[in-house]
Amino acid sequence: MTADGRVAFAAALIPEYRYEGVTAEIAVRCAPGRVHEVALTLAALDETRSVEVATGALDVFVELHAADHDALLTLVDTVIGRLDGVVDIHSAMVLRLLLTASDWAPYDDEPTDVRRHAIEGTALPEPPVVDELDRRLVELLRRDARMSTTRLARELSVGETTARRRLARLTASHVLHLRLHADPAVLGYPVEARFRLGVPHRELDPAIRLLAREPALRHLVVTSGGTSLLGYSSHRDTRDFQEFTARVFARLEGVTSTETALLMRTYKRAGFTAVQG
């Protein structure tokens, strides 16, 4: 399963938690017959984290991260906008990252610290300062997330105690995700969905707390635009998904719009390419 990308060990610093760069959710409208080609090209870009196609319009949904707004505009307009088969592009900025796949643990009894903060409506602790040594350590783990502290120390030319202390400080915070990345289908959740909700600002925090309590939810962000919440969920089957939407969305106050779709194919997930050409 590691060979086909469904299971992989991953290590990454999360820039949103460190207020670095800009993250955007992009919907790329494609001409008929060009979706697969466009999605493959987008998945090959270093800036994209996730690329998928869902039910509904011929859109490829992309999450990407850029250094700043100017770099984002260049990427969207002169790179993605010029791809053969692209008809239109809609972008929304991620204003607040609430949950990631690292907070999706359907078989765990207790929520992660990040999910617990979302449920309680409390702010995450201030992120630790990340220096060049930390970044080099994370880069080594990105190449081999199972690297021992002895080898980390040797590669970094520091003492093993220093390497162990640095790693412990980062893993104890929410800025480093060091985890086993698995396709939800491998864990028994083959049905994946995405949803967008229009929620007034006065109802946003209660909606976030309610959604965060749902174990099926594996990604949640606040975005710019007319629909303020974007989420992803994983389910055992379509009946489970239908029950989830009927039960959860009915409890949300003040929702002005709801849009749901089932993922048909995932090309890139958490930075890992899932579909080859």
Image (tube, rainbow, N blue to C red):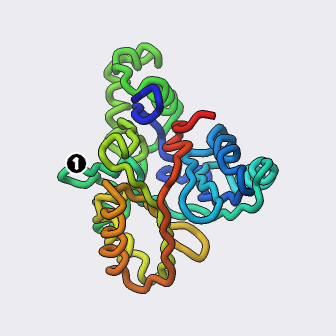
Q: Kindly identify the residue that appears in the image at 56 percent across and 51 percent down.
A: 52
Q: Nearer the viewer, residue 114 or 166?
A: 114
81 sits left or right of 207 in the view: right
The residue located at (72%, 50%) in the rendering is 34
Left/right placement of residue 277 relative to residue 154 reads: right
Residue 128, picture quadrant: top left
Q: Is residue 221 visible?
A: no
| Nearer-the-camera pick, 77 or 156 | 77
Helix, strand or loop under label 1: loop
Residue pictured at 42% horizontal, 50% vertical: 127
Please identify the quadrant where the C terminus is shown: top right
Q: Position of residue 7 (x, y in %)?
A: 40, 34
Could you tell me the amino acid type at mark 1?
Tyr
Query: Residue 183's spot in the image, x, y percent?
Result: 40, 42
Q: Report the quarter where the N terminus lies.
A: top left
Q: Quadrant of residue 8?
A: top left
The residue at which mark 1 appears reads as 107
Q: In the displayed structure, would residue 188 be above or below residue 257?
A: above
Residue 18 locus on image (x, y percent): 50, 50
Q: Report the residue that reaches farthest toward the left.
A: 109
For residue 54, above or below residue 41: below
Q: Is residue 2 visible?
A: yes
82 lies above or below 154: below
Rate crowding at label 1 as few (under 14), some (14 to 19) or many (20 or more) other CA atoms within 10 Å.
Answer: few
Q: Total label count?
A: 1
Q: Is residue 94 left or right of residue 29?
A: left
Q: Residue at x 31, y 54 (%)?
A: 236
| Residue 193 percent location from the top left of the image | 44, 59
